[in-house]
Image (cartoon, rainbow, N blue to C red):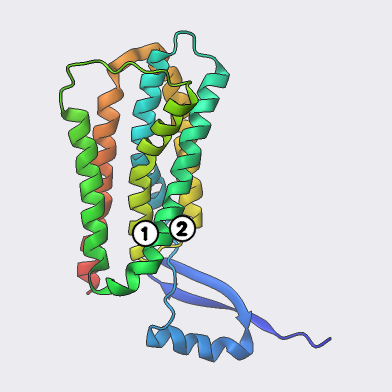
């Protein structure tokens, strides 16, 4: 059998490199497509930036996990694992859904995609800060081990990740690694949050949400400033 030769193409894309294997005979056509803007390369965001985003997104789940630890009378490992698995799974899935939706509409908003990314992150971050700062007269009473309650909490804490997935799609970032890291970071922080809640109560609950909101706003500003400087 005749075997077609392949060679690795390395496209230098700021801020990182996008690599893939393809037949050498197709290389000219591919490069032409990139040059004409028919095909756009996906950037691999730095691990540091992904981790910062993951930490920011996990703050909601972390805060709810702290509340869950407070609400559970006798916390066991299986309880913390259940909470962490649910929050981590939804948090990892939502960016994929958002990214897929963004791929379908980004062709229509290419001229202002970085502004949209900034606005989305700013709104999500500002909402987190607002929710953390507003006074709540009534204490929330809930059973975090109830499957329906846990399902609703999992969706509620991962909506922000859906918006971030949409944002990453607009700025052409590959989604698989960010989604995986977001899910893992959320799992770890949710597991720890349940035990922190059981031990320290409401001491950290609001502070972590404020920190998460500030981090997301900072990422949004970074994306916008970087785009304006390059343009």
The quadrant holding residue 55 is top left
The foreground one among 79 and 229 is 79
* Label 1 vs 2, first from the N-terminus: 1
Work out whether residue 138 or residue 192 is closer to the camera in this orientation and state it: 138
User: Does dot 1 land on a helix, a strand or a loop?
Assistant: helix
Tell me the quadrant of the picture where the C terminus can be found: bottom left
- State whether residue 192 is above or below residue 10: above
User: Quick one: which residue is furthest to the top in this view?
Assistant: 73
Against 13, residue 169 (above or below) is: above
Report the disc number at residue 168. 1
The reply to whether discs 1 and 2 touch (Cβ–Cβ < 8 Å) is yes
As measured in the structure, the alpha-carbon distance from the residue carrying label 1 to the one carrying label 2 is 7 Å
Q: Position of residue 196 (x, y in %)?
A: 41, 19
Quarter of the figure with the N terminus = bottom right
Can the viewer see residue 204 in this picture? yes
Which x, y percent locates residue 191? 48, 26
Label 2 sits on residue = 175
| Residue 128 in the figure: left or right of residue 158 | left
Q: Quadrant of residue 66?
A: top left
Residue at x 48%, y 20% (from the top left corner): 145
Task: Name the spot of residue 141 as percent of width and height, x first.
Answer: 33, 15
Residue drawn at point x = 27 percent, y = 46 percent: 216
User: What element does badge 2 sit on?
Assistant: loop
Q: Is residue 17 above or below residue 96?
A: below
């Amino acid at each position: 059998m005749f075997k077609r030769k392949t060679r690795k193409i390395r496209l230098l894309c700021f801020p990182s490199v996008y690599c893939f294997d393809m037949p050498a005979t197709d290389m000219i056509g591919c490069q032409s497509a990139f040059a004409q803007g028919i095909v756009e390369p996906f950037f691999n965001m730095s691990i540091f930036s992904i981790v910062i985003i993951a930490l920011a997104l996990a703050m909601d789940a972390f805060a709810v996990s702290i509340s869950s630890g407070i609400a559970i009378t006798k916390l066991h490992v299986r309880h913390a694992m259940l909470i962490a698995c649910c929050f981590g799974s939804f948090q990892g899935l939502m960016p994929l859904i958002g990214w897929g939706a963004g791929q379908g509409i980004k062709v229509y908003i290419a001229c202002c995609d970085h502004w949209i990314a900034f606005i989305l992150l700013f709104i999500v971050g500002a909402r987190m800060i607002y929710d953390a700062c507003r006074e709540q007269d009534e204490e929330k009473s809930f059973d975090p081990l109830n499957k329906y309650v846990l399902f609703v909490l999992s969706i509620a804490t991962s909506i922000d990740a859906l918006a971030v997935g949409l944002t990453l799609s607009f700025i052409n970032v590959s989604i698989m690694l960010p989604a995986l890291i977001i899910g893992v970071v959320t799992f770890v922080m949710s597991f720890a949050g349940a035990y922190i809640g059981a031990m320290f109560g409401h001491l950290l609950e609001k502070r972590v949400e404020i920190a998460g909101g500030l981090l997301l706003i900072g990422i949004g500003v970074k994306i916008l400033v970087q785009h304006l400087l390059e343009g």
